């Protein structure tokens, strides 16, 4: 027995020495930079995004929502669907600095991506919608965006056998109207999720999922003395669901877009906009709510400059200084946040004519447009 | 480094000055930690004050636009705290403007 004990002790010592040869993983802001480490797990998203109690997801709801999302007849001119701006080919955004609405009217804010919007606690650049359901009808109704007469749309949907069947299947015995249209679109949006990126795989334990440079970039990202990015682009969806003025040049113009201030009239909120997620960020250029940064390198450079207009800057935005290598590492890390592109199977839409046969005229702005 | 945000300290200071019988007033401390208030709800009496302490390693804000009390304590970093006292009974909804998921309620009793 003593012999066995000694052997075991020797074996344990050898094992300990063996592991001792491996350099301990660096620790940055409490994160141990080792694939799969427990400290990294807060960065994993929940398996399914949350949903309101009255809108549990089902295949029928998602399918109906997809039909509505891709149907251009939800717009006044019959030529713009949700997917016109939230285009899956362009990271569920539009690739434009700021969105183009009805008759290509240039709007004031960039189209936010749909990717992982389902995990946001608050929606839209200024947070004026609490949920995806709250948000869904806004762009349809806004006359500078899809410019739709909603009662007319509901009548059209009710008169169509294909849509009627799809609604009945998704929301039995419920009226085709604002609530069911909004809930269906929100149900579809909850399927547009990015959580299989190289970063996610690294957090789960695949040491080869990210390159050493991307791991170093993560360190720059979370280090308060380096990138200080995670102070706002926080775990797990790379957003704090918060509002910050990040010092964009557009805040310096006469009568700038005041952003969140329109919802919460506090000085701190002037020029503050919601922190966007960074998941799939490599697919959603250009960047910022005004589309003023063309590349991720431009974004990093903006933060290194400490912003252009520093009046009313977010107190959580600190001056940062990065070496060229750190800058490259950080951008490489941002490229590790993209999930592999998932095929999008387009729905089959009924082929009846658009509900709007008479071209509506442009009226003064109303509704929930991004320009307001 | 960090540009100071216009704080509304005078509001709190004035509110405090208006409160009579300070000797009887009690202070309740509410912390801001992990982007949450340490409690969802506190009950105080007219004349009492509540001290908000930031325990997170970044800035928070504290404000209310409720009828019973309207104040904005501005934004402040870890380790700092600011107080506000209440001179009207009612329900005061308190939020952090930066992180609107942070909400709590103060019931001010007569």
Image: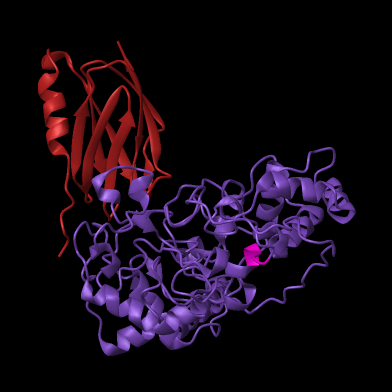
Chain colours: A purple, B red
Q: Position of residue A6 (x, y in %)?
A: 51, 77
Q: Secondary structure of the magenta portion, mostly?
A: loop
Q: Position of residue A190 (x, y in %)?
A: 65, 58
Place residue A220 in its image quadrant: bottom left
A131 relative position to B75: left or right: right
For the point 24% across and 76% down, the residue is: A304
Q: Position of residue A143 (x, y in %)?
A: 55, 54
A132 relative position to A24: left or right: right
- Start-end of magenta stretch: A79-83
Q: Is residue A213 above or below residue A43?
A: below
Residue A181 versus residue A312: which sits nearer the camera? A181
B35 relative position to A88: left or right: left
The quarter of the rendered structure image containing the C terminus of chain B is: top left
Place residue A70 in its image quadrant: bottom right
Residue B73 versus residue A323: which sits nearer the camera? B73
Q: Position of residue A97 (x, y in %)?
A: 44, 74
Q: Is residue B19 magenta?
A: no
Q: Is residue A221 above or below residue A166?
A: below
For the point 55% across and 85% down, the residue is: A208
Is residue A175 visible in the rendered image? The answer is yes
């Amino acid at each position: 027995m003593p012999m066995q004990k000694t052997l075991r002790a020797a074996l344990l010592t050898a094992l300990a020495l063996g592991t001792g040869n491996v350099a301990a993983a660096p620790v940055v802001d409490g994160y141990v930079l080792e694939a799969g480490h427990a400290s990294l797990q807060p960065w994993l998203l929940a398996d399914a995004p949350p949903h309101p109690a009255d809108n549990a997801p089902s295949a029928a709801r998602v399918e109906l929502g997809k039909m509505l999302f891709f149907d251009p007849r939800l717009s006044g001119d019959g030529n713009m669907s949700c997917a016109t701006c939230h285009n899956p080919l362009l990271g569920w955004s539009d690739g434009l600095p700021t969105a183009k609405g009805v008759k290509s009217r240039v709007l004031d804010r960039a189209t936010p991506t749909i990717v992982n919007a389902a995990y946001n606690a608050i929606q839209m650049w200024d947070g004026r919608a609490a949920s995806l359901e709250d948000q869904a009808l806004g762009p349809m109704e806004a006359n500078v965006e899809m410019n739709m007469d909603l009662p007319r749309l509901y009548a059209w949907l009710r008169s169509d056998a294909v849509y009627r069947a799809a609604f009945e299947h998704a929301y039995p015995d419920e009226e085709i109207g604002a609530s069911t249209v909004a809930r269906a679109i929100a149900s579809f949006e909850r399927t547009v999720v990015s959580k299989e990126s190289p970063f996610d795989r690294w957090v789960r334990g695949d040491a080869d999922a990210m390159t050493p440079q991307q791991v170093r970039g993560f360190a720059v990202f979370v280090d308060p003395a380096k990138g200080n990015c995670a102070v706002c682009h926080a775990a797990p969806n790379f957003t704090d669901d918060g509002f910050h003025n990040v010092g964009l040049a557009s805040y310096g113009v006469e009568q700038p877009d005041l952003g969140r201030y329109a919802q919460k009239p506090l000085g701190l909120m002037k020029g503050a906009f919601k922190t966007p997620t960074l998941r799939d960020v490599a697919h959603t250029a250009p960047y910022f709510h005004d589309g003023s940064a063309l590349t991720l390198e431009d974004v990093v450079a903006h933060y290194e400059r400490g912003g252009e207009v520093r009046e009313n800057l977010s107190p959580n935005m600190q001056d940062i200084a990065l070496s060229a290598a750190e800058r490259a590492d950080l951008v490489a890390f941002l490229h590790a946040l993209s999930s592999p592109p998932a095929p999008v199977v387009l729905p089959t839409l009924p082929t009846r004519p658009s509900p709007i046969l008479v071209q509506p005229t442009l009226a003064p702005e109303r509704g929930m447009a991004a320009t307001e | 480094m960090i540009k100071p945000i216009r704080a509304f300290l005078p509001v709190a200071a004035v509110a405090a000055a208006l409160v009579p019988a300070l000797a009887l007033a009690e202070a309740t401390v509410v912390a801001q930690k992990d982007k949450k208030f340490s409690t969802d709800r506190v009950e105080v009496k007219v004349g009492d004050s509540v001290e908000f302490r930031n325990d997170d390693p970044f800035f928070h804000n504290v404000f209310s636009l409720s009828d019973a009390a309207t104040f904005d304590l501005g934004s402040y970093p870890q380790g700092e705290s600011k107080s506000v006292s209440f001179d009207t009974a009612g329900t005061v909804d308190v939020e952090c403007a930066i992180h609107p998921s942070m909400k709590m309620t103060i019931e001010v009793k007569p």
